[in-house]
Image: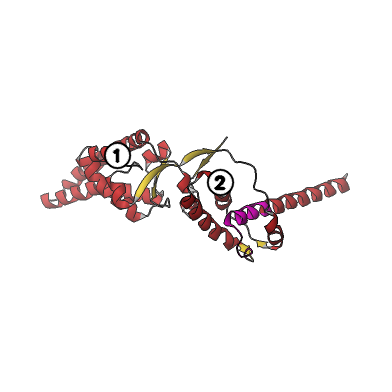
Amino acid sequence: MDSTRVDDPDALVTGEAVALDLPMASLPLRMVASLIDVVLTVVALVAFSVLAALASLDLDTALAEALAIVLVAAALVAVPTTVETLTRGQSLGKRVMGLRVVRDDAGAISFQHAFVRALLGVVEIYALSGTPALLTAALHPRGKRLGDLAAGTYVVRDRVSWTPGPAPTMPPALAAWAAGCDLRPMRPELGLAIRRFLDRAPTLSPAAAAMLEQRLLADALTHVHPAPPPGAPGDAVLAALLAERRRRSAEQLARQDAARRRLTTRRT
């Protein structure tokens, strides 16, 4: 069984990855991840407090208090916001537990999303001992805490098991177009996302399948010229692209293998 992780930032952009197909994170996993993050934050607060105490020896009372406030804000808001922004939704606790924060449309979060989550986390997690976060996550269908509700985000498991089905076959109606088109190289992440979509489309809701199909198709067609015949079904076009890419790769490998055999025969 192939365990596919969506660690690449591109793989979380809803135009490329089948992120809507990722399962929602369970409450126990989120609690463990949050506990890890809280412990790390407390350690950071202690370290910053020591720095503030050392710095206050040479400062007056007002400046020392201002410095303490800045360091606390850095530990509770600035650091979590920076980490989740740079990692596209993963704190250390979430990374350990295989979780990730995504937007409501399953795309990668931005600085704004991370900042809102961290800011409300000060109140619901630290000031109120996590009670509002726990209650809201337990009651919400997507397990959202208050910070997620305000930011428009939720947490998913980004380590999922996937056993690929049979390779897509060439739709007969598109065989001539695919054979004659200019097919530029695709990113591996895009090819994987298309393959996963074709495997799992029957299990998705019609709305999610249609949205993902259109976004994957729009991305894939930037690598193709000319465009497919008008009216061609999107899933058939995606299958044709993968099948043609596989055919051309197989032919290229066969030519390389034949060339190696010829060189070997001549030398012997």
Q: Is residue 74 visible?
A: no
The secondary structure type at the circle numbered 2 is helix
How busy is the neighbourhood of tag 1: few (under 14 within 10 Å), some, or many (20 plus)?
A: few
The kind of residue on which mark 2 rests is: Arg
Q: Which mark is residue 196?
A: 2
Mark 2 vs mark 1, CA separation in Å: 31 Å
* Residue 196 % position (x, y): 55, 46
Q: Is residue 264 visible?
A: yes
- Numbered disc in front, either 2 or 1: 1
Query: Which quadrant is the C terminus positioned in?
Result: top right
Is residue 188 shown in magenta? no
Q: Which residue is mark 1?
A: 139
The secondary structure type at the circle numbered 1 is helix
Query: Which quadrant is the N terminus positioned in?
Result: top right
The kind of residue on which mark 1 rests is: Leu
In the image, the segment drawn in magenta is 227-244
Determine the main secondary structure of the stretch shown in magenta.
helix
* Residue 76 % position (x, y): 26, 45
Q: Which mark is residue 266?
A: none
